Image: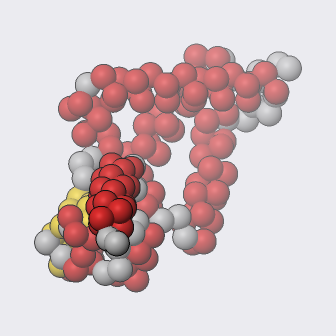
Amino acid sequence: MHSDIPYLEKALRTVGVYVLILLLLRIVGKRQLAQLSSFDLVVMLLLANVVQNAVIGPDNSVLGAAFGAAVLLAVNTVVVRAAARHEWLGRLLEGTPTTLARDGHWLTEVIRRNGLRRADLDAAVRHQGGDDVAETTEVTLEPGGALVVQLAQPNQSADKSDIEALKAALAALDEKVDALRSRSP
């Protein structure tokens, strides 16, 4: 239960490593967050192990680990809330959306620059209801790594209002059919 290093040093180490990892992930880009492949998962796990000693130092105590974890969670909470409150800070820390396709065509150079594979992007389009990029108006890679697909109007999935409109149209047709039946001898 005894900590081998002062708590202030432990707090400063934790904040420093947090900022370093945040900067490294920002430099590496959104691709790392968009699709966590087996390779990326291995890197993330090893990264956690590599920076562990920088955070807690030679301290192997339970109290020291709990303190380090508490500082890490507190710093993250402050950063996330500050980024949510101040749009400029959110853009600085997370970046901005990147357009990968426009008007049904992939932007090949942008895709290449972000280290993405077309096969993965095609799968994302299919996952979000399209058959092909030609059915999209825009595909963006969001700062958090999510791929957002905007389908062209004729290719969008039906929503509740579309279904209600169809029900109303069918009800009107049923009334007309019933009216015609009642007039026939």
Relative side of 78 to 90, left or right: right
Residue at image coords 51%, 38% = 17
Residue at image coords 80%, 33% = 60
Q: Position of residue 157 (x, y in %)?
A: 35, 63
Q: Position of residue 39 (x, y in %)?
A: 57, 72
Q: Position of residue 15 (x, y in %)?
A: 50, 29
Relative side of 106 to 117, left or right: left
Colour mapping: secondary structure
Q: Residue furthest left?
A: 103
Residue 143 appears in the rendering: no
The N terminus - image quarter: top right
Front residue of this view, candidates 16 and 132 = 132
Depicted 166 relative to depicted 111: above or below: above
The C terminus - image quarter: bottom left
Relative side of 138 to 63, left or right: left
Q: Position of residue 16 (x, y in %)?
A: 47, 33
Residue at image coords 42%, 43% = 22
Residue at image coords 23%, 30% = 87
Front residue of this view, candidates 40 and 123 = 123
Front residue of this view, candidates 150 and 172 = 172
Residue 71 falls in image quadrant: top right
Q: Residue furthest right?
A: 1
